[in-house]
Image (tube, rainbow, N blue to C red):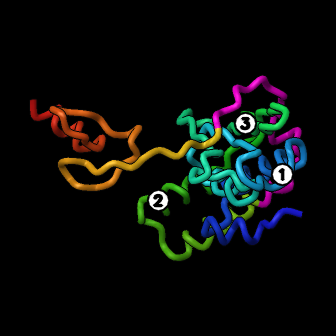
Amino acid sequence: MLDIQGTRSFHGHMCPGLAIGIRAAEIALREIGPHSADEEIVAVVETDMCGVDAIQYLTGCTFGKGNLIHLDYGKSAFTFIRRSDGKALRIVMRPDAWGERDPEHTRLFARVRSGEATSAERARFETLHQDRAQQVLDLPEAVLFEVVPVEARIPEPARIHRSLACATCGEIAMETRTRNYGGEVLCLPCFEAAVRRV
């Protein structure tokens, strides 16, 4: 049983995007394996939308452990890899999963985002938004996603590198994210600033 309430609390609210991540995590946990004890399961997410929070919370894949990899493709697509045997699957939201867009939801979403919505419009939007999230949670998997086994390159486990102090700002940066400039070690922002000045 998935901890939907915990996922909602972790994200801050329930929304259709979070529901998509919950459903993708549900498939991954069933097909790839249980909550990642450390780095055994790797998630490659092709979006930075709300659903990624569900992936983190439910599968245990996180940026901090190095087993959550973000590819900035803007797609509702998630690949899960089990390191022990290389089993991997890609879960992609079907383009027709939503059906027809609700014009009222779309209009209210724009008003809420612009800050122009009245309190009544906000309340109505919240109701429609919750209904849409529940719709995602209730849809059959085959309607919502295409799930395909894939050959995936298994990422290396997270490595720990030395930390070095930047000669310009004095802040500590991972050695692999520093540059040598004029004989001094610089963090990336200070290196980029130095190069722009030249």
Pick the residue in front: 167 or 21: 167
Residue hosting label 1: 26
Residue 106 image position (x, y, % from top left): 58, 52
Residue 92 image position (x, y, % from top left): 74, 35
The correct choice, above or below, for 109 with respect to 69 in the image is below
Q: CA distance from mark 1 to mark 3?
A: 13 Å
Q: Amino acid at mark 1?
A: Glu
The correct choice, above or below, for 192 with respect to 67 in the image is above
Residue hosting label 3: 79
Residue 72 image position (x, y, % from top left): 53, 36
Residue 178 image position (x, y, % from top left): 33, 39
How many neighbours does mark 3 have within 10 angstroms: few (below 14), some (14-19), or many (20 or more)?
many
Q: Is residue 65 left or right of residue 193?
A: right
Q: Magenta span covers which residues?
A: 134-156
Q: Amino acid at mark 3?
A: Thr
Q: Which part of the image, by quadrant, shows the N terminus?
A: bottom right
Pick the residue in front: 96 or 146: 146
Q: Nearer the viewer, mark 3 or mark 2?
A: 3
Q: Which part of the image, by quadrant, shows the C terminus?
A: top left
Residue 152 showing in the rendered view: yes
Q: CA distance from mark 1 to mark 2?
A: 30 Å
Residue hosting label 2: 113
Name the N-terminal-most of marks 1 and 3: 1
Name the N-terminal-most of marks 1 and 2: 1
